Image (spheres, rainbow, N blue to C red):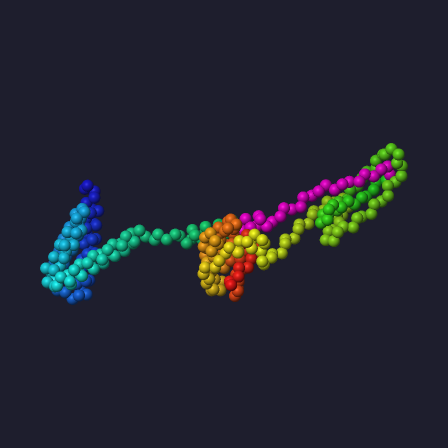
């Protein structure tokens, strides 16, 4: 109980100061008669009565009305207006004090940017994993065996788009054969493939990436059909759009990637470019047009 006395005194002092300031402002605005000691006594009495549990506030309002009437000797309408508006000002001051003590409750901009960059990195990694194809596995070419005779050089080719492999076969003995094997000529490889030098294994060339279709794939078109534009702000490189995916609305800026809940599941959507009649979006790495009309 003793430890609570300083806190009660501080609260009493603050409420008295706020009430005194509010009453003084109202009396000065209405140009009523007053004296400062009497006004201070009214504020002290009302603040003290306000500490009574349950009924203290009602008693404080009645006592303050009577004290202000004795102080100003004005009509009841002016006194009531002064007291009621004074309490309203006091309430606003209390809200300002609570806000000042609580500090800034807004989220940190740095943490929001870091989280957004992490989500963009995850979306780009997922898009890259979906678009990349595994490299073609090397296949062991078949080897022809030569019968009794001089060593032969045989060029064997794999399927199209694979490099040729040269094998040197040693002479072997075979029953019933005694003629030299003919020298095999190199097989022509399909267009776009290079034959390997003798005695070396060629590395298969990687398949070139497919060109990006501006209209997008069937999945991206199915996703973009469910999109609707709620708001659009054209501001150059800072343009933004509010997209409704049919599940949730998102705000996205030019060059920004956002993970969105769509009718086809979660997709990484990037706002690439703003045009007069359409928006260019990248849905899971595939460019798709979203028409404005």
Q: Is residue 192 left or right of residue 177?
A: left
Asked which quadrant contains residue 151, the reply is: top right
Check residue 70 for magenta coloring.
no
Residue 75's x, y, as percent?
12, 63
Front one among 46 and 168: 46
**Residue at the image position 21 percent from the left and 42 percent from the top:** 3
- Whether 249 is drawn above or below 176: the answer is below
Task: Give the number of callouts.
Answer: 0
The picture places residue 106, in percent across and down from the top left corner, at 37, 53
Q: Would you say 185 lies left or right of 264 here?
A: right
Q: Position of residue 84 (x, y in %)?
A: 19, 58
Describe residue 83's horizontal placement relative to residue 194 as left or right.
left
At 16% from the left and 54% from the top, the residue drawn is: 61
The quarter in which the N terminus is drawn is: top left
- The residue at 53%/61% (across/down) is 291
Label the magenta part by its dominant secondary structure: loop
Q: Is residue 99 visible?
A: yes
Residue 217 versus residue 234 in the image, above or below: above
Q: Quadrant of residue 174?
A: top right
Instruction: Read off the magenta span.
Output: 124-149
Q: Is residue 126 magenta?
A: yes
Expressed as whole percent of the image width and height from the top left, the position of residue 69 reads 12, 60
Residue that protrudes farthest toward the top in the picture? 175
**Residue 48 visible to an observer of this rendering:** no
Q: Is residue 114 left or right of residue 11?
A: right
Please tell me which residue is depicted at 80% across the width and 40% down the height of the picture.
144
**Residue 262 vertical placement versus 180 (above, below):** below
């Amino acid at each position: 109980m003793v430890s609570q006395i300083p806190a009660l005194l501080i609260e009493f002092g603050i409420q008295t100061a706020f009430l005194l300031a509010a009453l003084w402002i109202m009396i000065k605005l209405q140009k009523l008669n007053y004296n400062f000691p009497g006004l201070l006594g009214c504020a002290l009495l009302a603040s003290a009565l306000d500490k009574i549990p349950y009924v203290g506030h009602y008693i404080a309002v009645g006592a303050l009305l009577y004290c202000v009437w004795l102080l100003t000797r004005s009509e009841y309408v002016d006194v009531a207006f002064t007291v009621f508006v004074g309490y309203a000002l006091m309430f606003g001051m209390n809200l300002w004090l609570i806000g000042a003590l609580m500090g800034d409750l807004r989220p940190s901009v740095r943490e929001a940017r870091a989280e957004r960059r992490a989500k963009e990195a995850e979306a780009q990694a997922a898009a890259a994993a979906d678009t990349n194809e595994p490299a073609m596995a090397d296949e062991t070419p078949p080897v022809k065996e030569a019968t009794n005779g001089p060593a032969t050089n045989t060029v064997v080719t794999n399927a199209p788009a694979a490099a040729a492999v040269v094998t040197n076969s040693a002479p072997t003995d075979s029953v019933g054969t005694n003629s030299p094997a003919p020298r095999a000529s190199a097989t022509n490889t399909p267009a776009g493939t290079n034959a390997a030098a003798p005695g070396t294994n060629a590395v298969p060339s990687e398949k070139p990436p497919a060109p990006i279709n501006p209209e997008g794939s069937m999945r991206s078109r199915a996703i973009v059909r469910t999109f609707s534009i709620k708001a659009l702000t054209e501001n150059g490189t800072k343009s933004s759009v509010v997209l409704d995916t049919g599940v949730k609305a998102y705000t996205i800026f030019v060059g920004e990637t956002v993970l969105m809940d769509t009718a086809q599941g979660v997709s990484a959507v990037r706002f690439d470019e703003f045009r007069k009649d359409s928006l260019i979006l990248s849905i899971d790495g595939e460019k798709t047009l979203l028409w404005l009309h």
